[in-house]
Image (cartoon, helix red, strand yellow):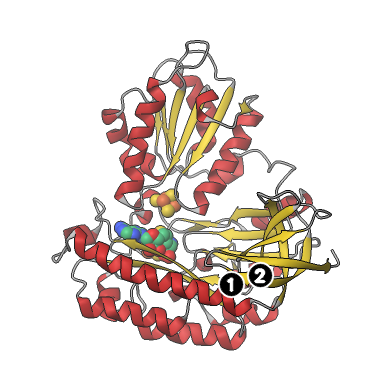
């Protein structure tokens, strides 16, 4: 097999995978390969996979089959590399079920991709180690150009072991990057054009990088000249300490939007999930956050149909959603994952029960998101322009509350931060009118 000239990275799963895909792309570009826009044109396709639910994980096998059956105009079949969390969890299984795959590389080992590709020219290469050396120390420097909004992974892995979740197995133990490395990367991204950074981690608020806690990291990154906005995701309610809550009152660059998953409104189910918080303690945390930052918008994740969930437990979930009033929320049917404690619990529910509960929860969530958007109509907010809209002269940007806002503004460019009056709201986005170009 000859060395691939072109590549395409397809990303599944969470924002940490989006970040990893960017780093892999930079690495492949540094190796002299060229990115293409379509998997059908690429000599090498990297599938950066997600193992969180069964459906996500199963998609990978159909993709491998389709890609391996395709041919490039030259008659050559593409190389296929499976990266990410399915690679980590099912390395051997992938090789068994999809023998045509060329490379299998876990999320902590992808800095070795170039040597693995070279090796794969002879025989398949598999690396799902969690090496002691950090990939961050070996990867090429960040590309000089970034968009107006960039992701930055500051912490990886998870020690929480929620009984339903594969992440502690696919990403390994909680590890924070040294604060000075994170700050240096943040500077590079801002110099490259980012106005907004989102700090990422599976438990980002458990960050502790060489003695610097998460609240302090936020203060230091917010002070970087040229950075307008800062966000972080995903947080565990247990690690939402008073210092971090205080930062929401103190740091204007920190946007008033927080993704704080609760998973269930039933403390009995939360215990079975090993979440280490109750419905009551979660609500108390929300209260403190709102005292610190009254306009904070909240988002969450929910699992319905966890083993043993009764109708009354599910109604507690609806109640907590009503009590919080989310601006946005994501909800999933419980998916039994091999090797997790919940998979072996009693009381697994039928698909129909799960589907019915999911539909009820989602109806409530959609209603709340729409209500949240409507409540902001008439307000003036700053919008960071992120992409071109469908209509000529239209740009789409994000409000501080992470709402998508469509603005007719032929004179503006992507990356502009402008003041906009919100005119009308839909369930997923708003229309706004430009007031003036805010000072940079
Ligand atoms: N670290 C984050 C969650 C990462 S996974 C946190 O602790 O909040 C993203 C979401 O996927 C979870 O919040 C949960 O709602 C959902 N999820 C995880 N495992 C799942 C499973 N086995 N079945 C269904 N949903 C699951
Ligand atoms: Fe999974 Fe729980 Fe860790 Fe989140 S905190 S990644 S849900 S084990
Ligand atoms: Fe999926 Fe792995 Fe992220 S399992 S949600 S891609 S950490």
Q: Nearer the viewer, residue 416 or 25?
A: 416
**Some atom of ligand 1 lies within 8 Å of the CB belonging to the residue at label 2:** no
**Some atom of ligand 1 lies within 8 Å of the CB belonging to the residue at label 1:** no
Q: Residues within 10 Å of mark 1 (few under 14, many from 20)?
A: many
For the point 22% across and 80% down, the residue is 312
Quadrant where the C terminus sits is bottom right
Q: Is residue 305 visible?
A: no
Secondary structure, mark 1, is strand
For the point 69% across and 78% down, the residue is 378
Question: Which of the labelled discs sits on residue 237, or is there none?
Answer: none
Left or right: 43 as drawn, with respect to 265: right
Disc 2 marks which residue?
A: 400
Disc 1 marks which residue?
A: 257
For the point 37% across and 56% down, the residue is 168
Q: Is residue 257 visible?
A: yes
Most distant residue in the top direction: 75
The answer to whether residue 423 is above or below residue 4 is: below
Spatial separation of the CA atoms under disc 1 and disc 2: 7 Å
Image coordinates for residue 279, horizontal then vertical, percent: 36, 82
Q: Quadrant of residue 100?
A: top left
Left or right: 153 as drawn, with respect to 382: left
Image coordinates for residue 423, horizontal then vertical, percent: 68, 72
Image coordinates for residue 422, horizontal then vertical, percent: 69, 72
Left or right: 174 as drawn, with respect to 341: right
């Amino acid at each position: 097999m000859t060395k691939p000239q072109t590549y395409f990275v397809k990303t599944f799963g969470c924002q940490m995978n989006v970040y990893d895909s960017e780093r892999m792309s930079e690495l492949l570009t540094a190796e002299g390969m060229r990115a293409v826009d379509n998997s059908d044109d690429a000599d090498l396709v990297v599938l950066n996979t997600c193992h969180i639910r069964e459906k996500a994980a199963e998609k990978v096998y159909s993709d491998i089959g389709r890609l391996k059956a395709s041919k490039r105009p030259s008659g050559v079949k593409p190389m296929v590399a499976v990266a990410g969390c399915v690679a980590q969890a099912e390395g051997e299984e992938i090789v068994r079920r999809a023998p045509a795959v060329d490379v299998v590389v876990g999320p902590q080992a992808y800095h070795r991709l170039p040597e693995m590709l070279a090796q794969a020219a002879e025989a398949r290469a598999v690396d799902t180690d969690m090496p002691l050396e950090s990939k961050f120390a070996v990867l090429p420097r960040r590309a000089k150009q970034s968009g107006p909004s960039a992701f930055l992974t500051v912490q990886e892995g998870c020690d929480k072991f929620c009984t339903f979740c594969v992440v502690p197995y696919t990403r390994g133990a909680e590890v924070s990057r040294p604060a000075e490395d994170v700050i240096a990367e943040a500077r590079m991204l801002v110099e490259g054009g980012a106005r907004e950074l989102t700090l990422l981690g599976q438990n980002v608020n458990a960050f502790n990088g060489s003695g610097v806690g998460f609240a302090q990291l936020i203060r230091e990154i917010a002070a970087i000249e040229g950075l307008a906005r800062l966000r972080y995701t995903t947080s565990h309610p247990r690690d939402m300490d008073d210092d971090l809550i205080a930062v929401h009152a103190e740091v204007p660059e920190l946007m008033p939007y927080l993704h704080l998953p609760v998973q269930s409104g039933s403390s009995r189910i939360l215990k079975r999930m090993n979440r280490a918080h109750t419905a009551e303690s979660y609500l108390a945390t929300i209260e403190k956050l709102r005292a610190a930052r009254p306009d904070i918008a909240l988002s969450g994740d929910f699992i319905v149909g966890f083993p043993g969930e009764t109708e009354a437990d599910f109604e507690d979930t609806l109640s907590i959603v009503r009590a919080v009033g989310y601006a946005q929320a994501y909800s999933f049917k419980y998916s039994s994952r091999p090797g997790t404690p919940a998979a072996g619990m009693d009381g697994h529910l039928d698909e129909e029960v799960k589907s019915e509960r999911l539909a009820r929860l989602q109806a409530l969530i959609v209603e709340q998101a729409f209500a949240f958007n409507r409540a902001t109509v008439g307000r003036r907010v700053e919008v960071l322009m992120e992409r071109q809209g469908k209509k000529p002269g239209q740009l789409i940007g994000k409000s501080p509350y992470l709402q998508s806002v469509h603005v007719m503004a032929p004179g503006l460019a992507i990356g502009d931060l402008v003041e906009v009056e919100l005119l009308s709201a839909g369930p997923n986005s708003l229309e706004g009118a430009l007031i003036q170009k805010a000072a940079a």
